[in-house]
Image: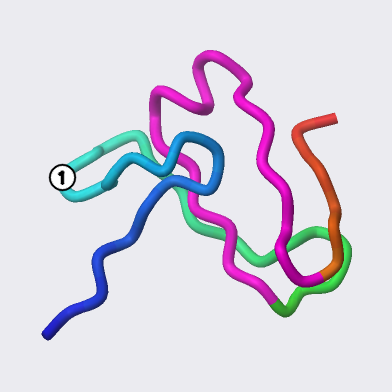
Amino acid sequence: MEEVKKCSATNARITNDKGSVTFKCPKCSDYEIVRSKHARQIVGKYTCPKCGFTGPN
């Protein structure tokens, strides 16, 4: 079964979300951050569960 990706800021599923992005944590590079199009538009904050980094700045 495929893992369902969820937004790190809003916890919304990003299936078929054309504006979503996935990237490694800018601080530790160990955790994958997922951002939905909506979270990016409203500049929703996310926190890396591994190192505690909070973004966007």
Q: Residue at x 25, y 75 (%)?
A: 3
Disc 1 residue crowd, few under 14, some 14–19, many 20+, Cα 10 Å: few
Residue at image point 68% right, 31% down:
45
Q: Which of 19 and 43 is in front in this view?
A: 43
Asked if residue 47 is positioned above or below residue 26 in the image, the reply reads above
Q: Position of residue 41 (x, y in %)?
A: 50, 17
At horizontal 71% and vertical 64% (from top left) the residue drawn is: 49
Corner quadrant of residue 54: top right
Question: Where, quadrant-wise, is the C terminus in this rendering?
Answer: top right
Q: In this view, does 7 lie above or below 27?
A: above
Lateral position of residue 20 relative to residue 3, left or right: right
Please name whichever residue, 9 or 38, is drawn nearer the observer in this view of the structure: 9
Residue 37 among magenta residues: yes
Q: Is residue 8 above or below residue 30?
A: above
Residue 4 place in picture, x, y as percent: 25, 65
Q: Which residue type does callout 1 highlight? A: Asn
* Magenta stretch: includes residue 56: no
The residue labelled by disc 1 is 16
Q: Quadrant of residue 43?
A: top right
In which image quadrant can residue 23 be found?
Answer: bottom right
Can you name the residue that lies furthest to the left here? 1
